[in-house]
Image: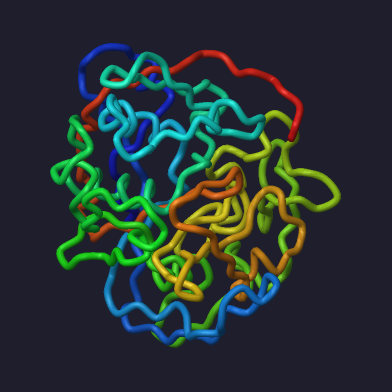
Amino acid sequence: MKARYLLVSCLALLCLGTLAQAVVIDTVPVGDPGNAGELSGEGAGGHGPDRICGSVGYVYNIGKYEVTAAQYTVFLNAAAATDTYGLYNTDMWSISNGCKIQRAGSSGNYTYGVASDWANRPVNYVSWGDSARFANWLHNGQPTGAQGLATTEDGAYYLNGATTDEALNAVTRKAGWTWAITSEDEWYKAAYYKGGTTNAGYWDYPTGSDSAPSNVLGNPTDPGNNATYYNAGYTIDSPYYRTEVGAHENSESAYGTFDQGGNVWEWNEAIISGAYRCLRGGSFIYSPLDTLQASGRSYYYPSSGLSNVGFRVSAVPEPSSFIALVGGFGMLLGFARRVPPK
């Protein structure tokens, strides 16, 4: 059974005011604890050494979708009235392929809104540090308040002001976590493992297939084995580039996740070459199919964000009726600015 958690929806964002916003976040359970891993890592231009990937010794839940711009906007409204650690990146609004989150006001009274057509697309221009702070905020029950130990700086990760690449690479997941950035093994298993037994083996692509997906967005329905990436053209053109999460409705992984191939690269916890955090899954602007494959692996500086990088979260298993309240203001800007691609 799919566990359902709180997620920001466009409808909830339309409501202004001080009331907590209650919406549903979908996760899927990943079972088969103690499954066998497989050798992976060199693809996508040899980014990082080979390693055994995908073996996880416990049951966990993982985000069915990438974290969206709408979800991240509620986080900003809850924890970034004074944005001490730079959770908001101005490129989210100002760059043509940003996720169209806009900030208003002055420090101490910042508020945030997301343009309606971007609300259900993956957030981008988030660093690994931003992603860890979002996970801490979930872990702490989604409180409203300044960026401190009770909100963003402790929880699944002890950050306590860490913002440099060196400091962020020293951060590890703590015992007793409830929400976290996915580990590489958690991410890999949810994307590629066939499931059903602990020796089931792996698909080559996170669409439950060994055949390369197309980049076509189904109309009116998705025939399956499709992903959002560049292949002699974008899956969806300017100004969006990224599809809404789950738009490839019949192209899920064996465990039921969507968009683990394409849309945006996703941060995970692994460190590559001692200086970078690992990325998995490829993105909307890359054409090589090996970036979507199980062998595809890339990396970037943990203190920086890019237009084609987002993230997904893992959670400890919870009853399917679990509900949490998002503390903060949800404000949706009901417009989208059309601009040419970069």
Nearest the camera: 334 or 96?
A: 96
Relative to 203, does residue 35 appear above or below in the rendering?
below
Relative to 110, does residue 183 appear above or below in the rendering?
below
Q: Is residue 53 left or right of residue 44?
A: left
Q: Is residue 282 left or right of residue 127?
A: right
Question: How many numbered discs sit on the rendered protein?
Answer: 0
Image position, residue 81 (x, y; %): 28, 24
Image position, residue 261 (x, y; %): 60, 58
- Residue at the (31%, 21%) spot, across then down: 107
Image position, residue 330 (x, y; %): 33, 21
Query: Quick one: quadrant of the N terminus?
Result: bottom left
Q: Is residue 243 left or right of residue 126?
A: right
Relative to 297, does residue 199 appear above or below in the rendering?
below
- Residue at the (48%, 22%) spot, across then down: 102
Relative to 322, does residue 328 appear above or below in the rendering?
above
- Residue at the (27%, 75%) spot, across then down: 58
- Residue at the (45%, 84%) spot, across then down: 37
The image's colouring method is rainbow
Image position, residue 268 (x, y; %): 43, 62
Residue 121, quarter of the rendered image: top right
Query: Quick one: quadrant of the C terminus?
Result: top right
Nearest the camera: 91 or 101?
A: 91
Residue 326, quarter of the rendered image: top left
Q: Residue furthest right?
A: 232
